[in-house]
Amino acid sequence: MAFMRYRGLPQGEVTAEEFWAWLGQFDADHDGRISREELQRALRSLNLWFASWKAREGMQAADANRDGAVGREEAGRLFAYAQRQLGGKITQLGSY
């Protein structure tokens, strides 16, 4: 297994596009959507406690069509969850 180095989550206020680009680093299958496992990897990269639990909760909050992944059409719901759980601020949500 190759080790990959990920850019950290930008600090302070980030745009929705910046947050989605950060998540895109963890899109292992390059389908443009974020699965629970990919979200869990992203949260673990931040050294968060309970990353698995938070990924599961995030998917429940964001995956409106229950297909097991969050696409751009559901990204706003994931951003809202991330703001509550990560304590950051994501701006320009209107485009999502």
Image (spheres, rainbow, N blue to C red):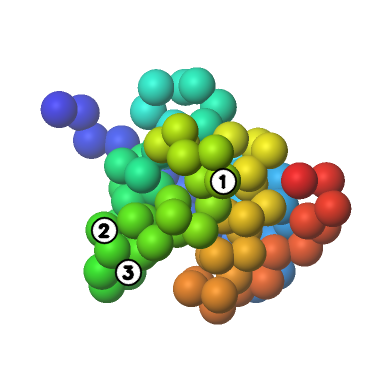
Q: Position of residue 35 (x, y in %)?
A: 40, 38
Q: Position of residue 4 (x, y in %)?
A: 31, 36
In which image quadrant can residue 28 be found?
A: top left
Which residue is disc 1 drawn over?
64
Q: Residue at x 47, y 40 (%)?
A: 66
Disc 1 is placed on an element classified as: loop
Badge 2 element: helix
Q: Which mark is residue 16?
A: none
Circle on res. 52: 2
Q: CA distance from mark 1 to mark 2?
A: 19 Å
| Whole-number angstrom distance, CA of label 1 to CA of label 3 | 25 Å
> Position of 74 compared to 23: left or right?
right
Q: Nearer the viewer, residue 46 or 54?
A: 54
Mark 3 residue type: Leu
- Of circles 1 and 3, the one toward us is 1
Q: Relative to residue 77, is residue 40 drawn left or right?
A: left
Residue 48 image label: 3
Pointer 1 or 3: first along the chain: 3
Residue 81 drawn at (x, y percent): 55, 65
* Amino acid residing under circle 1: Ala
Q: Where is residue 40 shown, x and y percent of the image?
A: 33, 51
- Given residues 82 and 73, the one toward you in this image is 73
Q: Quadrant of residue 50?
A: bottom left
Which residue is outermost to the left? 1
Label 3 element class: loop
Foreground mark, 1 or 2, reads 1
> Can see residue 43?
no
- Residues 35 and 26: in front is 35
Q: Amino acid at mark 2?
A: Ser
Q: Is residue 59 left or right of residue 2?
A: right
Answer few, some or many: residues within 10 Å of disc 3's Cα (few below 14, many 20 plus, some between 14 and 19).
few
Give the vertical position of 87 relative to 41 (above or below): below
